[in-house]
């Protein structure tokens, strides 16, 4: 009873937390553009925190720098289950222009925490970020919640993530 | 109280309620506009495997040249592939792509050609922003003649529609090459002359391959090359002495020729270089061993950096044209071993 109620609520809203792990902040600015009236993120039921303890979706922007390696894992651990990680931009995927020889970035992010969806681009368009968040949630989050309980019916999540991953 | 009633009345209006209930982002905002510069498109059939795109790319791992394997009736083709996880959509690769039509398409910037009015002269004058020292001598000179050069953003800029092509600005410019007079006609003939000059100079250097291979790391090998032969050849292409002189001077001014030498005696047929060569110039044959085809070679130096036995040598040649009459000029060639590290991936 309580679980089904939780599922309904999870399907209707997403709480996202933006973690910038040392990039150029271009992707952060694109996320801010999402919050602006032009794109108006909250009409889709997505709400932004800077608190991982309240987050369903963790948005990672930035190549992982020396200081972020352990902190990133701590942040991931702090987010309550079910949680989804979306990598925004090329930095978390490959390190982008920062991944030169001799530089101290530790991209990709998937070396540290599991990544569910990727948005490539430097920076990606706000609409692409929005599409990625909507692709992994809220259904995937709800399905992940069921998975965590040991229920095997959770198939739609795989489909939604697979589309974005490619 | 009256204001509360007014608000209730306002919110109860049908148009307000409809707008409130149907509020959504305009479709136009969510769509990617056509001017958006997306990831580069690759049209592999046009690629000439020059590697300019990989050199211009600012992001590591974004662009890579690959080659399909040869089969019995066709040679493999070389083309760039874009890694969207690394590409920053800057469009530099499309900008530098020298093929026509372009192998790489990215945005519209690289398709824009500068407009200029066709002048009654055969030269167009341009200012090289990189070499210009902003002394404004050209502006001063031109203001008395045509007034075509003006200062925009602290840089001298030539208004092509006003320029009369007198060439006074070049005479007064204190930096060699900061203002260039470019021949806008006979482009094909200019290309032919440039190719002929470069090929002749390279053949001359490669004739001395034995001496070049013995050079110590800091040693320089010098050759004097009289221009008589080049001028005679060029006159057969186009009998225009001014254009020939201009072409030869520009070639020798900026050319940094890469010379690859090949010492077959040192080769142990380990075939490390065969797989590394991006253009397929190095091949292996059971009877002949490892062979290099100079016509296919890009002079990229990968074989030199790969070979553990020093079979491939890599040298850089520079040129200087002495300031004399066209026929009895001398091109001074200097060949120097390259400072590239060996065995670095």
Image (spheres, rainbow, N blue to C red):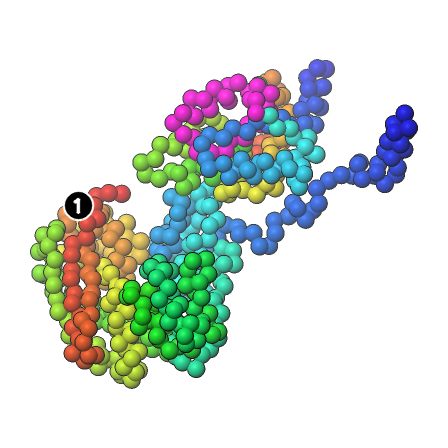
Residue ID at (23%, 70%): B199
List the residue tagged with mark 1.
Answer: B308
Residue ID at (47%, 74%): B162
Q: Is residue B167 left or right of residue A71?
A: left
Give the chain letter at badge 1: B
Q: Nearer the viewer, residue A147 or B195?
A: B195
Q: Is residue A72 magenta?
A: yes
- Give how far across and how far down residue B190 sits, in percent: 33, 75
The answer to whether residue B97 is seen in the rendering is no
Q: Is residue B149 left or right of residue A3?
A: left
Magenta stretch, residue numbers:
A50-79
Quarter of image, res B227: bottom left
Q: Secondary structure at mark 1?
A: loop
Residue ID at (51%, 28%): A19
- Give how far across and how far down residue B135 sits, in percent: 34, 62
- Give how far across and how far down residue B315 sits, in percent: 18, 56
Looking at this rendering, what residue extends furthest in the top direction? Answer: A2
- Give how far across and how far down residue B221 sits, in percent: 11, 60
Q: From the viewer's perspective, is residue B11 above or below residue B267?
A: above
Residue ID at (39%, 54%): B53
Q: Nearer the viewer, residue B16 or A46?
A: B16
Q: Is residue B32 magenta?
A: no
The answer to whether residue A55 is seen in the rendering is yes
Q: From the viewer's perspective, is residue B49 above or below residue A152?
A: below
Q: Nearer the viewer, residue A7 or B124?
A: B124
| Tally of numbered tags | 1
Q: Image quadrant for the C terminus of chain B?
A: top left
Quarter of image, res A142: top right
């Amino acid at each position: 009873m309580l679980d089904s109620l939780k599922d309904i609520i999870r399907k209707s809203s997403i709480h996202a937390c933006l973690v910038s792990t040392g990039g150029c902040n271009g992707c952060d600015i694109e996320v801010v553009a999402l919050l602006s009236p032009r794109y108006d993120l909250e009409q889709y039921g997505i709400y932004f925190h800077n608190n991982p303890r309240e987050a369903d979706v963790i948005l990672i922007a930035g190549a992982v720098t020396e200081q972020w390696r352990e902190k990133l894992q701590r942040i991931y651990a702090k987010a309550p289950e079910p949680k989804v990680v979306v990598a925004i931009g090329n930095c978390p995927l490959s390190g982008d222009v920062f991944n030169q020889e001799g530089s101290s970035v530790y991209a990709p992010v998937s070396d540290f925490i599991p990544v569910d969806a990727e948005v490539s681009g430097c920076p990606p368009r706000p609409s692409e970020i929005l599409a990625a968040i909507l692709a992994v949630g809220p259904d995937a989050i709800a399905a992940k919640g069921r998975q965590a309980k040991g229920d095997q019916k959770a198939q739609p999540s795989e489909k939604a993530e697979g589309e974005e991953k490619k | 109280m009256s204001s509360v009633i007014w608000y209730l009345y306002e919110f109860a209006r049908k148009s307000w309620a409809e707008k409130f209930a149907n509020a959504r982002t305009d479709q136009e905002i969510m769509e990617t506009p056509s001017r958006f510069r997306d990831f580069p498109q690759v049209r592999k059939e046009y690629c000439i495997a020059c590697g300019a795109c990989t050199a211009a790319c600012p992001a590591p791992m974004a662009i890579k040249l690959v080659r399909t394997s040869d089969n019995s009736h066709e040679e493999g083709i070389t083309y760039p592939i874009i890694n969207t996880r690394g590409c920053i959509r800057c469009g530099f690769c499309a900008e530098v792509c020298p093929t026509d039509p372009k192998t790489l398409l990215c945005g519209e910037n690289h398709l824009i050609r500068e407009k200029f009015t066709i002048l009654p002269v055969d030269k167009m004058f341009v200012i090289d922003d990189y070499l210009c020292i902003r002394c404004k001598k050209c502006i001063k000179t031109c203001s008395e003649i045509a007034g075509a050069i003006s200062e925009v953003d602290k840089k001298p800029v030539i208004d092509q529609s006003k320029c009369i092509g007198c060439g006074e600005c070049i005479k007064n410019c204190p930096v060699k090459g900061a203002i260039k007079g470019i021949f806008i006609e006979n482009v094909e003939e200019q290309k032919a002359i440039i190719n002929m000059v470069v090929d002749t100079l390279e053949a001359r250097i490669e004739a001395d391959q034995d001496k070049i291979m013995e050079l110590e790391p800091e040693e320089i090998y010098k050759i004097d090359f009289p221009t008589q032969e080049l001028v005679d050849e060029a006159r057969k292409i186009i009998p225009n002495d001014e254009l020939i002189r201009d072409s030869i001077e520009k070639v020798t001014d900026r050319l940094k020729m890469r010379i690859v030498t090949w010492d077959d005696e040192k080769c142990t047929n380990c075939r490390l270089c065969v797989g590394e060569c991006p253009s397929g110039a190095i091949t292996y044959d059971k009877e002949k061993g490892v062979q290099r085809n100079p016509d296919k070679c890009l002079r990229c130096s990968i074989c030199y950096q790969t070979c553990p036995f020093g079979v491939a040598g890599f040298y850089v040649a520079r040129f200087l044209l002495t300031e004399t009459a066209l026929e009895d000029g001398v091109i001074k060639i200097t060949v120097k071993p390259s400072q590239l590290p060996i065995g670095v991936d």
